[in-house]
Amino acid sequence: MGNSFEAADRLSREDNVTFASAFMYVVNIRFAVLKHYQPCYFGVPQFQEEFERYIAKLKNWIAEVNGFINSIHTVDVRVYVTHGQGPTGLVVTPHYWEGKHFRAGVVVRTFQGPERDFSDATREKVTLQVNGSRSTGIAADREQFGVVAMEETAQAWEDAFSAALRQALSDEVLNRPRMAIDSDREGLMVDGRILPTSVEPRALLFEVLISREFRRRVEKSWPVLIEGGDDRLAQYAFQRLFSRDVTEEEIQLIRDIAAKYSYAACIAMLLHSEEYEERYGKGLPGAPAGQQPIFPALSSSDGET
């Protein structure tokens, strides 16, 4: 863990774009190590911030190379003329619209319109052709200079966090079948709206836990807990969050807050408690090995949740 961080951090401080390939290689190793030793890396702010720096660095290099490529591909559209000597002196004869695409000052392609057609429509047609050649040249250079691979790598790093976070919340908290919408890069679909994964993980977890979709799943166990009956929901919450049993005083506090304020206030109390802050900060609790998702774990022996 330490060596992979030092290597990635060292290369992230280089300014020359020639280090981009080495940087991507080392950060990919860093990610593999992180994933192995910290399976819930996507919910840890420290690692999120670390990879945000790497992604920003790579995107800066991408912008630098794209800027260079765009600058060497230029176009020029004008009327082609010839110069000759006439009875009264120099004669300039216009012939047609001509467009040229240059790469680093060297002509790549030339386009021309019909003879003696100087209309705006012909100029626009030639301009469209020469710009099309420029776009093709830029695309070829982006591939050749490795920009496409760099962009794919940056996207993969982003997806490694956002996709894993979405899937963990869907599997572990909502415990719903996987849907196509869960692959949406915009965020997690809950209650018919998108919750962006760009916010801090704890805030996202809070939104999921107070959602109608989640509350429908605890509509039996929550009232029973508040009314003084089965306390499995509280026991599970404390085991999952703090790896310990809930005390009678804590259960009574939950009941008091629920009665005076709301269900959401109880969730906020847990996620913003000192114990949560000390363990996870603004991140997410990891999923302990062998731990069931919430709803199966809450199922009673006769199958009723």
Image (spheres, grey):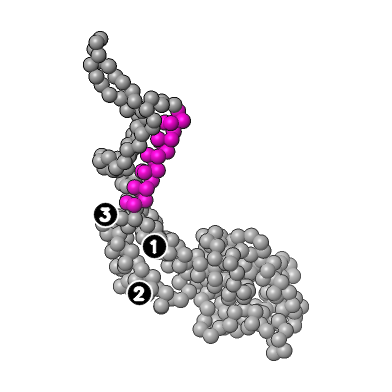
The residue that mark 2 highlights is 1
Q: In this view, does 239 lie above or below 152?
A: below
Disc 2 element: loop
Report whether residue 3 is seen. yes
Q: Where is residue 176 in the image (x, y as percent from the top left)?
A: 63, 74
Q: What residue type is labelled 3?
A: Asn
Q: Residue furthest front?
A: 115
Using the image as rendered, state which of residue 289 and residue 111 is in the foreground: 111
Q: Position of residue 125 (x, y in %)?
A: 43, 35
Closest to the camera, between mark 3 and mark 1, is 1
User: How far apart are labels 3 and 2 at the CA level?
Assistant: 26 Å
- Mark closer to the chain start, 3 or 2: 2
Q: Where is residue 233 in the image (x, y as percent from the top left)?
A: 66, 79
Q: Position of residue 285 (x, y in %)?
A: 52, 74
Quarter where residue 160 is shown: bottom left
For the C terminus, give its image quadrant.
Answer: bottom right
Using the image as rendered, state which of residue 87 and residue 212 is in the foreground: 87
Q: Are marks 3 and 2 in contact (CB under 8 Å)?
A: no
The residue that mark 1 highlights is 153
Disc 1 element: helix
User: How far apart are labels 3 and 1 at the CA level?
Assistant: 18 Å
Q: What stretch is highlighted in magenta?
A: 120-141
- Mark closer to the chain start, 3 or 1: 3
**Alpha-carbon neighbours of circle 3 within 10 Å: few (<14), some, or many (≥20)?**
few
**Alpha-carbon neighbours of circle 1 within 10 Å: few (<14), some, or many (≥20)?**
some
**38 to the left or right of 206:** left
User: How far apart are labels 1 and 2 at the CA level?
Assistant: 21 Å
Q: Which amino acid does label 1 sit on?
A: Thr
Q: Are marks 3 and 1 in contact (CB under 8 Å)?
A: no
**226 to the left or right of 162:** right
The residue that mark 3 highlights is 16
Which residue occupies 32% across, 38% down? Answer: 110
